[in-house]
Amino acid sequence: MTTKTWAKLSVAAIALAAVNGEAFAGSFAVREQSAYYQGLSFAGNGTTGPSISSIFWNPATITGAGDGITFESHNTFIIPDSEIDGQLTGAPLAGIPSSNTSSGDIGSEAWVPSTYLSYKVNEDIFLGLAINAPFGLGTKPDTNWAGQFYSRSSNALSINANPLVGYKINEKISVAVGLQVQYFDVSLKSAVPSAALGFPTGELEGDDVGFGATAGVTFKPTDGTELGVGYRSAISHKLDGDFNLPAALGGSRPITAKLILPDSVTFSFKQRVNESFRVLGSVEWTNWSRLTAPKVINSNTGGLERTLEFNYDDGWFFALGGEYDYNEDLTLRAGLAYEISPIDDDIRGTRVPDADRFWLSGGLTYNVNENLAFDLGYTHIFLEDADIDISGNHQDLITLGGVFPLPYNGEVETSIDIISASVRYRWGGPSKDRDYDTTRKY
């Protein structure tokens, strides 16, 4: 394989680098930003409630915060179990190791922290800050597995700071806007199909800071009913980094690659059935189809290396849940969700072997006093079994010497467990005009 071909393949992985689909959410978004809404499978996550973590999806929900300052710290632990069983086929295979071995468990356990702050300036104006990791990745199959030429390891990190301001127009309508500042870092490794060099590892690394916006509105048409719509804008990143290749293949060289991480819209509702029970729901659309053709540029020459065709569909997420106030201190909740992946059979590869999935969640809130509360959430995700067929006209297919293709065919089996916990504390005393208690009631 030529240095140029290997460089193209490495850069192609940039747009896949944000997260392994099985570990988090559809494609490479990280939905796990709240222990409170984890227990609902994220139903109702764009409406106001005791937890201000809803500002991640709809900043207008900041107007439901209590007097003074509210602080929340959320910590989520994601435990995936994912394996790809398949084989490398085609010709010639002489000298290529492990052409029919399993990947082993490719999923890496992940910790996803989130922090939220709110400050009530007066009865109409609210300030907020959300610090999240909305995109990320961590996978590592066995080193000499059958698909090593398509992926050996993948790591990515994002940190997103989102200051915002909310305004309560009246008791029925609130609006908000915010700024996103996001750092994104990528490191990807794959085996170079060169028997003469002992199948060394090629690495791609790069990082960037990008900017975006958030906006939202909440509407309470009647007592006990609330609707919310939130928007997170796309963020453009120009990754500056290097290819770290063996010296015989040209060594390291600087590259840049522009990609746009998708925007999303969340619609949520909440309906109070009685004083103790509420029904919540959400629909989320993510604009993954904007990843159709990012361009790869050689930093030294300024020339176009390749136009990358990803052919993603848009992603959809549907959730329905309910919560019940068992007593003054304890609230129980549960939720179901179904997620349609933006990655279908035609483009599924080994680095992001994503598929449609079902969510089953449960959780609780325990109120220690009027200012302090703890949330717990648990989710088990069932992913549909998926096939990988990198052959024919598949966009990931590589060749030896530009002549002999190396097709890979396999099956993916994945399940995920997610455990989330948070602490919520408020300084400033209980609100006197909210439509729900400071830590529990709506």
Image (cartoon, grey):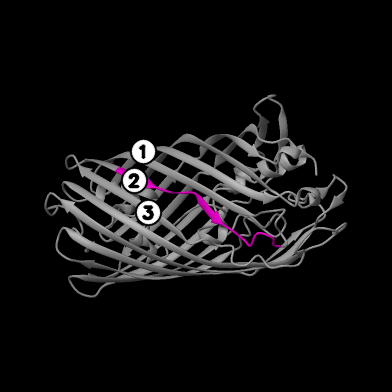
Residue on which the image places disc 1: 178
Residue at the image position 55 percent from the left and 44 percent from the top: 186
- C-alpha gap between disc 2 and disc 3: 11 Å
**Residue type at the position of mark 2:** Ala
Does the rendering let one see residue 99?
A: yes
Under tag 2, what secondary structure? strand
Which mark is first along the chain, 2 or 1? 2
For the residue pair 410 and 290, the one nearer the viewer reads as 410
| Residue 44 visible in the snapshot | no
Q: Is residue 395 magenta?
A: no
Residue 301: x, y in percent? 70, 24
Q: Amino acid at mark 1?
A: Gly
Disc 2 crowd rating (10 Å Cα; few below 14, some 14-19, many 20+) is: many
Which residue matches tag 2? 130
Q: Quadrant of residue 181?
A: top left
Stretch in magenta? 129-145
Which residue is located at x 18 percent, y 60 percent? 372
Residue 340 in the image, given as x and y percentages of width and height: 57, 60
Q: Which residue is mark 3?
A: 113
Query: In this orientation, which residue lies closer to the viewer: 240 or 19?
Result: 240
Residue 96 falls left or right of residue 292: right
How far separated are the C-alphas under marks 1 and 2?
Answer: 10 Å
User: Mark 1 and 2 residues: CB-CB less than 8 Å, in contact?
Assistant: yes
Helix, strand or loop status at disc 3: strand
SS at badge 1: strand
Q: Are marks 2 and 3 in contact (CB under 8 Å)?
A: no
